[in-house]
Amino acid sequence: MKILITGVCGFVGSALAECLVERVEGIRLVGIDNLARPGSETNRTRMQQLGVEFVHGDLRSATDISGLPVCDWVIDAAANPSVLAGLSGAGSSRRLFEDNLSAFGNVLEYCREHKAGLLLISSSRVYSIPALAGIPLRVQNQAFAVETNAAMPRGLTADGIGVDFSTSAPVSLYGATKLASEIMAVEYGIAFDFPAWITRCGVLAGAGQFGTAAQGIFAYWVNAHLRRRPIRFLGFNGTGHQTRDAFHPRDLAALLLAQMRTTRKGGQRIYTAGGGPANAMSLAQLNLWCDERFGRHAPAVDTEPRMYDIPWVAMDNTAAAREFGWRIEMPLPAILEEIARHACEHPNWLEVSRA
């Protein structure tokens, strides 16, 4: 089996490559990355040591895509990851469109031409911001949690947010690019007869994640807390109660492998995956964990609400467990400990991975 990974020098792409090499005997990997993101260059040598055939190229360039070797599957791990992308700076909205839609169009054309299966890594941020903000919540142990005694909106259960939760606008510019990519992936797969699987992911977290809040709040917070850098509780009355679930790329790799090994055609193509409510944590809880690990460091408080911020997200893994036999293996405390060890071993990580 030969697999192309886009964004292979990003955190998720590189972690998936490492997991696939470990788990699948005889696998051949091709990876493409434009190395534009700060920190991505650090993964280039590691990918080559793993035996990944690395291509320095830009997915926005049809010429760069046309030069790639034929592969059986494409794992699309390349995108601008920030929910605030496109909002600031001249031309930033055009750049977001090019990064997340024009580039993905070239990936789809590659799949069409070579009949390669597609595994699209999508996002929990395709969901309606008003619907997410309207989830009935209570405060429990300094974190938002779903008020299970209240009426639940469609697509939400005690197990988390599922595929049927509302995707009505607004979802953010970033969320709109991911939702559009999902639709095009399914349509291309049907029109040109190649398998397409879409996974809407919760927060992916682990050692080596780039140290910016936009690219991974758990890794950023641990690194910033350890170095006594300024950290802030934003919005939500400055409580830090906003809560996210997290899971490790190793667990995502197991799901992607199960999808690749599934031969059925038709049926459900979009799934949700994440840590779920059991692997969810608020910023306040995360800061307490860091206080215990590194010593006390108090965040500043900024009560001003920020565009697109939401109070709670945790993904429902029920369908993925039922249809692929998939479950989370790495608990959140183990993920945080892995991040902390990496942060201690790389004292300049925030500088390496920030623009």
Image (cartoon, grey):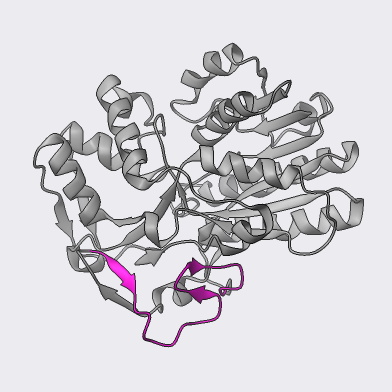
Q: Percent position (x, y) of residue 151?
A: 43, 88
Report which quarter residue 154 is drawn in.
bottom right
Camera-nearest residue between 88 and 167: 167
User: What residue is shown at x 28% (from left), y 32% (from top)?
Assistant: 340
Q: Percent position (x, y) of residue 89?
A: 44, 47
| Side (left or right) of 132 relative to 294 | right
Highlighted range, magenta: 143-166
Report which quarter residue 321 is drawn in.
bottom right
Camera-nearest residue between 40 and 322: 322
Residue farthest to the bottom, as pictured: 151
Report which quarter residue 149 is drawn in.
bottom left
Q: Percent position (x, y) of residue 307?
A: 38, 64
Check the picture and name the quadrant holding the C terminus: top left
Residue 55 visible within the image: yes
Q: Is residue 124 magenta?
A: no
Considering the whole magenta stretch, tell me its main secondary structure.
loop
Q: Is residue 311 placed above or below 224 in the rendered structure?
A: below
User: What residue is shown at x 46% (from left), y 83% (from top)?
Assistant: 152
Q: Percent position (x, y) of residue 64?
A: 75, 27
